[in-house]
Image (cartoon, coloured by chain):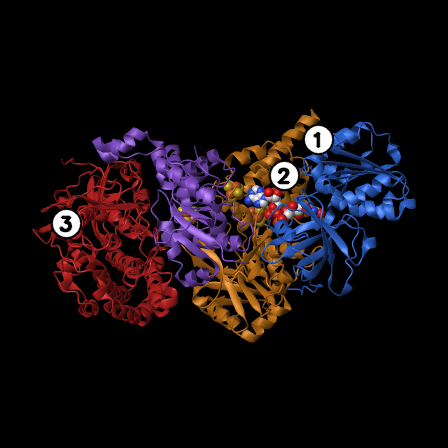
Chain colours: A purple, B blue, C orange, D red
Amino acid sequence: MSKPKIAFFDFTSCEGCQLNKLNLENDLLDLLELVDIVEFREAMDDKADEYDIAFIEGSISTPTCITRIHDIRRRTKILVALGACAVQGGINAIKNQHSADWVKETVYGEDKYLFPSIPVQPISAVVKVDYEVRGCPMSTPEFLHVLKSLILNRKPEIFDHAVCVECKLKENECVLDKGMFCLGPITRAGCDAICPTFGQYCTGCRGVVSNINKNGAVEMLKQHGFSTKEALNRMKMFCTLELE
Amino acid sequence: MENLIFEKKDLYNPIISTITNVEQLTDTEKRFEIALPENQILNHKPGQFVQVSIFGFGEAPISISSSPTKSPLFDLTVRNAGRLTDKMHRLTVGSQLGVRGPFGNGFEVNNFKGKDILFVCGGIGLAPTKSLIDYVLANRNDFGRVVILYGTKSPSEILFSDEIEKWKKDKSVELEISIDRPDENWKGKVGVITTLIPPLKLDVANTIATIVGPPVMYKFVLMALKGKRVPDENIYLSLERRMKCGVGKCGHCQINDTYVCQDGPVFHYPRVKELKEAV
Amino acid sequence: MSSTDVKSRLESFNCYYFDKDVTQKFISFLMKKGDVIAPHKTGELSYKYEIVSDATEVVLNYSRTILPLKKAFMPPRETLINFNIKNNQYTKPQISTEPKIFFGIHSYEMQSIKRLDYSFITGLPESNYLTRRENCKFIGVAYKPDEWHFAGSVGIDINETDGFCLYFYPAKNGYIVFEITDEGKNLLDEFGEGSEVTDEYLKLNEDKFQAKIKFHHNRIPEIFTHVYNSKVWEDVAQKCVGCGTCNLLCSTCYCYDVHDEIELDVENGQRDRFWDGCMLNKFAEVAGGENFRDNLGSRNRHRLYRKFKYITNQSDKLHCVGCGRCSRYCPANISLVEIVNDLIDDYTKQQQKEIL
Amino acid sequence: MRKNLDIDVHHLTRVEGHGNIVVNMKEGVLEKAQLEIVEAPRFFEAILKGRNFHEVAIITSRICGICSLGHQLTSLKATEDALGLDITRQTELLRRILVDGATFQSNTLHSLFLAAPDYLDVGSVFPLINTHKDVVLAALRLKRIANEIGELISGRAVHPIACVPGGFTQIPSAKNLLALKNKLVNEAIPDAEFIVDVIASLVEKIPVFSRETEYISVKSEKEYGLYDGDIYSSDSGSYKVNQYLEITNEFVVPHSSGKHAKFNRSSYMVGALARFNNSHNQLNPLAKAAAEKLGLKAPNYNPYMNTIAQVVEIAHCIASSIELIDTLLDEGLKNEKPNQEPTKYGRGFGLTEVPRGILFHDYTYNKQGKIEKVNCVIPTGQNLANIDDDMKKLVPEIIEETKEQITHKLEMLVRAYDPCISCSVHVLNVEFIE
Ligand SMILES: Cc1cc2nc3c(=O)[nH]c(=O)nc-3n(C[C@H](O)[C@H](O)[C@H](O)COP(=O)(O)OP(=O)(O)OC[C@H]3O[C@@H](n4cnc5c(N)ncnc54)[C@H](O)[C@@H]3O)c2cc1C
Ligand code: SF4
Ligand code: SF4
Ligand code: SF4
């Protein structure tokens, strides 16, 4: 088996997902045994023409993003979206909840015309995405799982159940019980319920599970003391586009 | 606490077996001939299945598509559908894989003796049925008419073309094939499998019908058989569910109170009628 | 239930009085015999079973633990085999059979283990579970039902002692300890402490359950033969968000999923099983994407039918033990007792209609 | 003498975010020498409007994955200031450790993984794994420990979890803190000392360049200004945090989606070198020894030396976090809940030194505890004008070198600032300056 050529690209994002990869200190050297990193702008100068696997971080939010992602798609065999911005639009997509003009004016005032910006879209809205690694930041164990699977030439196994599952298995005290807000019951697992494990509520960064009972979720939050408006607003923090 | 003395079983240890032959049947299906180590015999009944595993790629239930008369070797006919089966398709003669089983009940062949048999097979459903067809043909005198109805999406998906040729030549076998989406070379019948049923002339009281195919097919085939007045007691079907253990523990294959892996996959239709989530 | 019921049931057993200190000493004594697993506080409102490292940390007046005792016999995540991809070899991890003593167990929890025993023995007896079940002793404790416990409604009394070797019943500043089995007697003999129980302490009383199913438990399976198409399931589906909490925390649920995971050398790996649940999205999906229980109504129905009918038909026991976890921890506040009572109402109405 | 020069570095590598370097000289006249910020704007000030105070720091953390902790803490400070939420001493101590950890981790990443390859003539850290394995391993260990500080106290090194308005959702155990401290003492200090020696041997490769500018940083009476203090300008002294707008004076330039800033001169510098120049006396002994070895003396006017100042700070932060953990353990850990009962509503300010320099958040809350107005001034934005000014002085000085050399030196210059471009593209309330 020859080493697959992998590349990392960033679009509109905080680059936290890329940093998360560099935070794999203990595994980094082992990883480099398995793959050839041919492009990683944040960490290196080299550039390549073709890749076996392209990992994409960030959302589509400018016209140039669109041409760039098409170009990458053409040059890669497998394309993996990394993190909330790339998978479901993430925090960036909150701006889609407002009128584009108002958003630009709020930030740049009279100069709003200087900066092209289009509604935020996930990568999959523009090109075919083969696999996803969710989370804000992306969960590193899941990233490793996908990478190992692809090296083995097998389909990764990605969960489609709620963070609640992982939270219960860790025997955490329920955050809702403590009177806090929480999106664990409707958010896709895969992070090992890290936020509730640290006493914080789940903000839903990994996006909602498929077939979600949206009305039920709002009712659930209402029972825990949050108004419909507040519930919906907070459900949309990372999931504007999934809950449209 | 009273002692729990039982014959404890290591249920999850696969037997590492060897692929002795691979045959490409269609674009997406291959037949694998498997040998257990040290000439062990699988000892299966037609309709039973094994849990096949490849380390790193997981496990999946696969029906045994050869007759027990082929022992000690046995065949698995596999469609490339996902993680495990894709890897299987990349294996070659001499490669190893894990086998647990045989599991499930299989067809009650003794109840079929002396009867006409109508085999209704959709797509990959021919694979498990073939084990029974082979058995019936190997003991041809024990049975009455043998009618095989087989439907696939396209001509290129037709399985076991060698056997099909044999069956076509065999005077004692009535074979009908229908294709959903024919190509220009297809001369045979066109349409979903249910269209083959109305023209049949059956001695319904003396006919056993078996149905195996994709989940969507059952409802329609059953309706067509009802139209022919085939009694419910004469119908058997093999159901497919996701299975993680094969031994009645993991819960995935449960239909109401029934575990497909233990109480099935072959079901007598009157039983299935009671099961509300079955077809 | 009256105090005499409790009395007559427990009175047949020999008993001693342990004050708080002696109780702690007893725990320390048990710790010399093997791992002692007992309830501990975790967070402000919650408890969990943990191996005791300090006898003073054990909490005996607890409501219920988050995870049930099944975690000791079927861990949330367990490796079935360790394999090597290159040479196609594997080993099965050793399961410890060191003695374990479960201390401070409620009666419904003990009964849940009996239900699990049934599930893992029936058909093919599974070695992973049964090996963990070897060399276990259970010591019970009485509890005060909160608004979610309803064990009484499924036929399990608070002071049901079946399965325990010893049973602790709260008394002034301590406990009355009943010898239920010879095994328990031997433990107490060896421990050698505890005083005679004087009348002052022997005030046995059974607390009442606040949550109740309207019908006697013998009649519950009967209801379930008639309510498969009840509208109640649709109502539940409106509220349920499908998080799976009720499955995972249920004392008698045991469904699981299996995954192969590989290490970074892309050569070694393990086949793991972990808890799954029929409330979860993909549980009943088959190849090709068809899902035979694709809505929350049918999934809730399946969950309850498993507790009250499917397994019950074969084992003759209700497979819900009334621990109340599914309801206490449901984020959507769906109560199992309410569902069953709604089904009963529905059934009663149906019958009245038939009579008319 | 070269008369014409045209440099266009598209998507500069080994920096956070997207920037281009454009230099343009015609007939001996330098028409352009600038860093263009092409990162897509992300509109945080708009996104935050109407958000509940519990959510604000969660969102602002996403301004930048590299400085996520800095953004969170600054955000929390602004929220706490606006809502009148007092924090306990324990919370403050834990936050200080986090700031040390974040500075330690970011400076390690930048100086050792992103900038160091320039001095070893390679394009990334990866080839160094073969040629300088012991150095890479030491650097990886340092980065790991630095991340462990964040992971233990806040749950995650990127986008921390446990830091909330009024305190922490969960307090680390004494046992784990002690283990961390032991690791810092037994592993981080020797590794850092080793790295300082390695870097000291490379200092001679740093380009010689000097341009005195205005240095702005946090300054505190008590300590090396990182976690808190006043704003300090090397030109004109101290200011309170609520005067930050007088200092930053942001303005929009067409070539950058990040806003520029200026105060007493046409530009000013923030970051490790600014902090070092302003507060070097308050470094702890471990850091002073490192500075000595590395030949860094205040004041230093060579922006390339920013990388060296970062290495000095690594030593400072390790020693400082050890001290803070000791204090915490001596005083005993208490299981405190965050204080989240607002006592007032209105405007609040927060400032922190994040690795790239001084960071401001300025929030206005309405009576429902929802955000009405937001302003964030990011260090990289403040440095942009200074980088342009450096380039304008540098290009004529090195004009006789090859185009590749010039390009490389310009890239190194920009990289030395450790610009965090993703951060720099969202600012509000512009005073348009022509
Ligand atoms: C009793 C029995 C007998 C069987 N006999 C045979 C046989 O003889 N021959 C045969 O070929 N098959 C047979 N099957 C079917 C076979 O077990 C399944 O196709 C099995 O799932 C293949 O496993 P896999 O790991 O290759 O596929 P998986 O990776 O599990 O994928 C299986 C299917 O699920 C879908 N899928 C996978 N992941 C996802 C996802 N994330 N989201 C949506 N859909 C997804 C795929 O599209 C595919 O259709 C039998 C099944 C049963 C129960
Ligand atoms: S718990 Fe929720 S918010 Fe936290 S990482 Fe997991 S999915 Fe994201
Ligand atoms: S715990 Fe409640 S919301 Fe979650 S799946 Fe069960 S019934 Fe539904
Ligand atoms: S169904 Fe609910 S009450 Fe019954 S045993 Fe399970 S968790 Fe407990």
B215 relative position to B109: left or right: left
Is the CB of the residue bearing disc 3 within 8 angstroms of ligand 2? no
Q: Position of residue D173 (x, y in %)?
A: 35, 62
Report which residue position mark 3 lands on: D268
Report which residue position mark 2 lands on: C292
Q: Position of residue B263 (x, y in %)?
A: 73, 47
Tell me the amino acid under the disc marked 3: Tyr
Q: Secondary structure at mark 1?
A: loop
Report which residue position mark 1 lands on: B184
| Other residues around mark 2 within 10 Å, as few (<14) / some (14–19) / many (≥20) | many
Rounded to the nearest whole Å, what is the CA distance between mark 1 and mark 2? Answer: 37 Å
Q: Mark 1 falls within which chain?
A: B
The answer to which of C126 and D60 lies nearer the viewer is: D60
Quick check: can you spot residue A24?
yes
D29 relative position to B172: left or right: left
Do badges 3 and 1 share one subunit?
A: no
